[in-house]
Image (spheres, grey):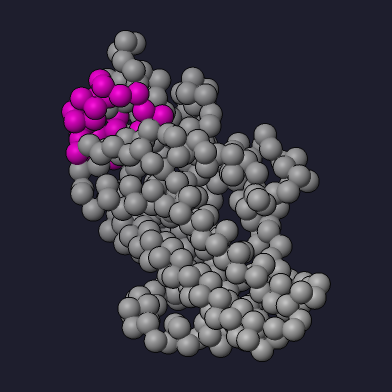
Amino acid sequence: MNGRFTDSMKKIQDAHILIVHGTPYNRKMIGGILQLMGAKHIDNAFEASDALTACLDEPFDVVLAEMGTGINDAIALTRQLRQNPASKNNLTPVIAITNGGGDDVIDDAREAGITDMIKAPYSADNIFEHVMYAINTPAEEQINDAAHAPAPQNEPETKSEEWPNEEESNALTGMLMDHYLRHHEIVLTKLRFAQNATKESIGEIKQIHEKIKTEKDSKEDALQDFSSMWEKIIKMFVKGGLSEQALFDIEKIITQIPDDIKQHYNDLTSQDQAFLARMEKLNKSSYESAKKKVLTLQDEPNPITGKTPADYQAAITQENDEDEESGTVKAIVYDPVQQKMIFKSFESE
């Protein structure tokens, strides 16, 4: 994540988000993802009528609403919000969430004032990108852009991926969401193991190398820095806002720890049965296959806005590209020569 995403994290923490979905599991899943992304203020509604009641009392920064339940779906909700100028949410961005269909009601959605659509199958990062775009772009601009977006072009005769049916779309979405939630928990656990393993190594070095503690750049000094590094990254988890790729980046760091720490780390992980059980449930090969398919599908222009994931990223990041020269870089890498972390995915502290 670059500087713009770091700045945007503060906004998602303050943003008030309303999730409108008829399925409790979907509300919980989307809400859980948003919480891990940093959201602190999330309300839920079963259908449009419940959402309208909520909208009478509180202004929301964005509404995510299910598409396709007739008179109580996202279109009905948005139309009523837009037709009431006195409403606190008259201009609130509304992101319609579909189960893989929805293409037949695009014109109705635009006419009602829906600003965006997340079409299943989708991933946690897709939700993050669309929500960040919604809360960082002026509402009037989103409504106008969606209303005047170019109509989808005719489908090419040959496509690399056919859009799956509703059942498969839901299955792919569920797999990616579940993997993100499980992976987040596992990587956080791994970080705590690495932190404890580092502390054990520091203790050993204190006993064995007492006489060289004060030497500049001694191994103990390097490990002390290494120990504080784990705490910084763990704080990032608590703060929220880690993308799917960021989890893999951080997990890779753990595989690059020095051998003496790695031995303690391996001992700790092998003795934790609950951790081992969670690892067994994490189906990496199925996730990679599903992720590849969804990335290809989501790369198509959005049916409401006409934007691609690259467009959403560009809209979020365009204001602070210069931050990369002032301490915010693109990845986190452990430098074995310096025995310290080089921060490249998060704003350096």
Compare residues 71 and 345 and report the one nearer the observer. 345
Please determine whether, in this image, residue 22 is positioned above or below residue 207.
Answer: above
**Which residue of the protein is positioned furthest toward the front in this rendering?**
211
Which residue sits furthest top? 86
Q: Where does the image place residue 339, in percent across and percent down from the top left?
A: 72, 73
Q: Residue at x 69, y 77 (%)?
A: 220
Snapshot quadrant of residue 284: bottom left
On screen, residue 23 versus residue 263, left or right, reads: left
- Tell me if residue 86 can be seen: yes
Residue at 73 percent across and 77 percent down: it is: 213
Q: Residue at x 59, y 44 (%)?
A: 6
* x and y, in percent, of residue 244 in the image: 50, 59
Q: Total label count?
A: 0
Q: Is residue 116 rendered magenta in the image?
A: no
In the displayed structure, 45 sits above or below 114; it is below
Is any atom of residue 308 visible in this view?
no
Looking at the image, is 297 positioned above or below residue 179?
above
The location of residue 253, given as percent across then percent down, is 61, 71
User: Going by the image, does 297 lie left or right of 330?
Assistant: left
Left or right: where 115 falls relative to 340: left
Q: What range is drawn magenta here?
A: 46-75
Residue 203 locus on image (x, y percent):
58, 81
**Residue at image location 69% in from the left, 38% down from the top:** 320
